[in-house]
Amino acid sequence: MQPMWSAPGVSGPLDATVRVPGSKSITNRAYVLAALADGPTVVAEPLDSRDTRLMLGALSALGAAHETVEGGVALRPLAREGTDPVSVALGNAGTVARFTPALAALGRAPVRFDGDEAIRRRPIAPLLRALTELGADIDDDGRGAPPFTVRGHGGLPGGKVELDSSASSQFLSALLLAAPSFDAGLTLRLVGDAPPSEPHIAMTMDLLRRFGAGVERDGREFHVRPAALSCPAYTVEPDLSTAAPFVAAAAVAGGTVRIAGWPENSTQPGDWLRELVTDLGQRAELDGSGLSVTGTGRFPGARLDLHEVGELTPVVAAMLCFADGPSVISGVAHLRGHETDRLAALVTELSGLGGQVEETADGLAITPAPLHGGVFHTYDDHRLVMAAAVLALRVPGVQVENPETVGKTFPGFVDAWTAMLGR
Ligand SMILES: O=C(O)C1=C[C@@H](OP(=O)(O)O)[C@@H](O)[C@H](O)C1
Ligand SMILES: C=C(OP(=O)(O)O)C(=O)O
């Protein structure tokens, strides 16, 4: 039997200050750029979780050494000369699966990529195709999915390419991050439907610039010049998507939750949560020490297009189960290719607790209904653990299956959640 967590309910208005760990997306971008830099980089306040350990493991296999130092991780640039075959373990980390194959093409070894069963089902074919067009030598037996092998030949010509990044913004981020190391840089034109997760694309461009790269965007066209990268010290922001369940808790349970260190400006999609809770009639105040959310426990239903902030969907859907009226979430068809099929998982698990939730072509329709306790299955998806915790605030008897899977991005989640509730 899988381990279970009896997620705690709330006994009165909240009054808590929470510290969430560093951003997964920023940490793994900083690690990749550090590996591509000309000199050493210290990444301060990084996330230490399954996904970031997988990234460090991948970079080590590719020849970029790292060591833990006071307050962070020090990385050295990729040594690109090794020719012995190596393996990269992807787990179920989208950032590792999408960001590291281009780095393998810059080296000289055959590199085999594989991971959890789930990562074999997640989309990556358009990225592998684009890398091949840019000069990479990739053997995937025609599967367009892991396991695949990238045979490095000491560099990538780069140049012009078209990319369909509608299934995941990470395809685009992957090419942009590696592009300063391509001989001719990169001129990329997006084709097909618009990529999801625009803030993550802005985040990629922001980090590239912090490492000294020249990157420009004109609508669907991106241009990256070949450049030597350098950023001796980079500090990671707290993860605002990890903060989502704590923000939602203030709205659902009432009272005040303060998230320490919430940045005044951020490219993270989670920064949109301030707007969401304000639109739903709660109070969100940002100052130099962080974000303070004061909730009422009551809010209206909402129609939300979450295309740009898809990773927030599980927590937002859980929160909307307590709204005063029906809600519709749209723009998130691509969540069927996330850690699990998140739309199917949310419909099954929310319905299992009595919720009235239907899957639409590109999202969910949620009609508030009385909920009851029961087992909430989590499909090895960290954000489903977080969603279940939000539900349990007002639904006694919610048993969360395999809570440890939250360690993909926040190994200390259960303790931090319990502390927020004063238990
Ligand atoms: O680049 C990134 O760090 C991420 C981009 C998004 O991926 P998709 O565009 O595939 O949704 C997001 O959902 C994921 O959690 C992290
Ligand atoms: C989609 C997510 O992760 P990944 O980086 O594996 O794509 C997520 O964290 O919600």
Image (tube, rainbow, N blue to C red):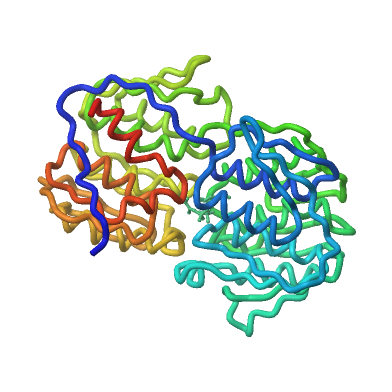
| Quadrant, the C terminus | top left
Residue closer to the observer: 6 or 357: 6
Residue closer to the observer: 258 or 85: 85
Q: Position of residue 349 (x, y in %)?
A: 23, 57
Please give the name of the residue rendered at 56% of the width and 63% of the height, measured from the top-left corner.
90
Residue closer to the observer: 165 or 111: 111
Please give the name of the residue rendered at 36% of the width and 51% of the height, measured from the top-left corner.
404
Please give the name of the residue rendered at 20% of the width and 42% of the height, measured from the top-left corner.
392
Give left or right: position of 230 versus 122.
Answer: right
Please give the name of the residue rendered at 70% of the width and 70% of the height, measured from the top-left corner.
86
Q: Residue furthest top?
A: 288
| Quadrant, the N terminus | bottom left
Give left or right: position of 219 versus 292.
Answer: right
Please tell me in which quadrant of the rendered image residue 344 appears.
bottom left
Please tell me in which quadrant of the rendered image residue 414 appears.
top left
Q: Position of residue 374 (x, y in %)?
A: 14, 54
Q: Position of residue 302 (x, y in %)?
A: 30, 40
Give left or right: position of 157 versus 5.
Answer: right
